[in-house]
Each structure stands twice: as C-alpha cells, then as structure tokens.
C-alpha cells in the first residue's frame, strides 16, 4: 500500500504540473488555484504513505535514498502550498510541481525500504537539512521565474511570461524568504552532524560520510552566497535570483556525483 499511495501522489503531482503548463500556454489564471488543490490532495496521499512507512518499519522515513527523497518531496510540496498563500505566487508550482513529481516518482521506483539502522536523535539533523534544501528549492523556482520575467521586461516583450508569472517583487520576496528559511535550518543541520560525528565512537551508529558532509557544507555556502548577493544596491534581486538558480543546479549536480560514487547508502540524504 505504501507504493500505491506514492504512485497515486506522483500522478496527482504530474496532473497538477500539466495543468499549470496548460494554464501558462493558455494564460488562464484560474487553473493554478485548481492545481494547488490537486497538489494538496497529492500531499494527503503522500502523508498516508509516509505514515504507513513509519508504522511498518518503526522509524521515520529519513534514512536511505528512497525514504529520504520521498520526505524531501513531501516537504517541498508543503513549501509550495505555503508559497501559494502569497497570492499570485501559486504559479511557482509551474517549476516546483515537476520537481516534486520527479522526487516522489524516483523514491517509489528506487523503493521505500530503510537500511535497518536506527537514527535516534540524529534524525533531527536530517530533518533540518531537508528544510534547508526545501528553502533553496523554493528560492531556485522563484529565481528562475524572476530571471525569465526580467528578460521579458528588459526586451519589452509582454507575452505569456509577463501575464502569467507573479510580479518581480513577489518572486523576489518569495526567493528571499526561501533563503532565509533554509539558511538557519541548514546551519543547525551542519552543527548537529559535526557534533554527532565528533562525539560518536561506536561504529554501529550511523554517521554521515565525509564526502556528504562536504556536500552539505557546500549547500550551506550556496545559501549564504545567495543571501549575500541580495545585499547592497543595484540589481540585487537579479543577482540573488541568478545565484539561487546556479547554486541549486550545482548542489544537485554535486549530490548526484557523490551519490554515484558512494559504495553504499549513507545517512545524510
């Protein structure tokens, strides 16, 4: 049943993404609200799947590739719904809905089976890291839409991007809030991970691999750099959006490299 609920949520996320794509092409502003409702329904199925996983395996879905990706996708969906409360920011789902669908689908295909290790309070480190990554993902989506609309305005083109996307101020505010949400949580995650690593001598207790800690630190640097890019005058919104987009892509690319090079599944993501 866990897999059934996951595939059901993937279908709903995919439908929502398709509706948002249709809405963008046809410039229909009513559809994003409907799409957010479908995403909310998908999150309900997703939550049931995660709850069943917790009951069946007697641990939270935080460790292992499948469970961790599923949890990250769920938190990103929650973040999307929160962003949708910012009026026209519901259209940010045009970018986030496919991301959520891919993460959830990958988790379902890989399999939602834990490694058999007990995380104890170390799971708090992973939860904080997830929230930090959700903040960066939201900043990426807002930044990508910001850059696309900025280019339209600069070229004095007022097509579908201009009419469908939220105003630049809304996107800039959403991206800034995503960064300000993610940075403190990722900072806490790093502190907990390092503290756990330095205090644990029992080899049977899981700890993050050095390469993954380096990746986590790099993610923290990306968030900090994006926040700093917004300081000062000039086109700080454009700078912040650009760093958020490029930084997110770098974080994803490095994660894939680290994951591919790992001989076994690690605790950190």
Image (cartoon, grey):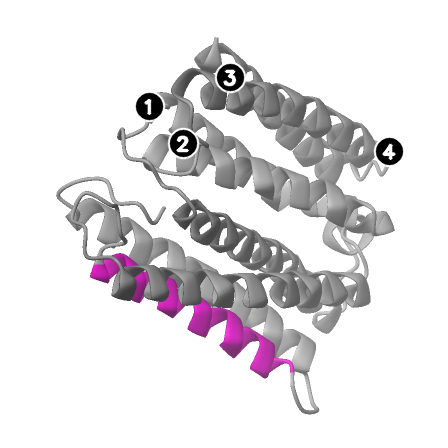
Q: Which numbered disc, 1 or 3, marks the residue that appears first in the sequence?
A: 3
Q: Which residues are magenta?
A: 210-230
Res 138 quadrant in image: bottom right
Give the Cα separation between the discs numbered 1 and 3. Answer: 12 Å
Task: Out of 103 and 98, give the one closest to the viewer.
Answer: 103
Q: Is residue 76 above or below residue 153?
A: above
Under circle 1, the secondary element is loop
Query: For mark 4, does the 10 Å Cα neighbourhood hold few (<14), some (14 to 19), or many (20 or more) residues?
Result: few
Q: Which residue is mark 1?
A: 113
Q: Residue at x 78, y 50 (%)?
A: 89
Q: Which residue is mark 4?
A: 30
Residue 52: which disc?
3
Query: For mark 2, does the 10 Å Cα neighbourhood hold few (<14), some (14 to 19), or many (20 or more) residues?
Result: many
Task: Out of 66 and 238, give the one closest to the viewer.
Answer: 66
Asked whether the beta carbons under mark 2 and mark 1 sit within 8 Å of each other, the answer is yes
Q: Residue at x 51, y 70 (%)?
A: 223
Task: Out of 71 and 136, give the one closest to the viewer.
Answer: 71
Under circle 3, the secondary element is helix
Res 213 quadrant in image: bottom left
Magenta stretch, main secondary structure class: helix
């Amino acid at each position: 049943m866990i897999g059934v609920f996951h595939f059901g949520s993937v279908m709903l996320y995919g439908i929502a993404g398709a509706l948002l794509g249709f809405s963008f092409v046809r410039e229909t502003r009513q559809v994003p609200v409907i799409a957010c409702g479908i995403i909310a329904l998908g999150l309900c199925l997703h939550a049931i799947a995660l709850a069943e996983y917790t009951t069946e395996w007697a641990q939270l879905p935080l460790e292992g590739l499948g469970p961790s990706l599923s949890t990250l996708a769920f938190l990103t969906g929650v973040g999307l719904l929160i962003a949708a409360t910012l009026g026209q920011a519901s259209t940010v789902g045009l970018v986030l809905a496919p991301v959520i669908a891919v993460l959830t689908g990958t988790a379902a295909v890989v399999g939602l089976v834990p490694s058999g290790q007990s995380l104890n309070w170390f799971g708090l480190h992973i939860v904080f890291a997830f929230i930090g990554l959700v903040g960066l993902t939201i900043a990426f989506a807002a930044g990508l839409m910001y850059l696309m609309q900025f280019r339209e305005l600069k070229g004095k083109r007022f097509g579908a991007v201009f009419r469908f996307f939220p105003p630049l101020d809304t996107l800039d505010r959403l991206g800034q809030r995503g960064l300000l949400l993610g940075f403190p949580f990722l900072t806490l995650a790093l502190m907990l991970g390092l503290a756990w690593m330095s205090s644990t001598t029992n080899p049977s207790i899981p700890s993050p691999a050095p390469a993954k800690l380096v990746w986590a630190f790099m993610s923290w640097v990306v968030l900090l750099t994006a926040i700093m890019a917004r300081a000062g005058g000039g086109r700080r919104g454009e700078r912040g959006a650009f760093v958020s987009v490029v930084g997110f892509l770098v974080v994803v690319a490095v994660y894939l490299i680290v994951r591919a090079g790992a001989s076994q599944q690690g605790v950190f993501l």
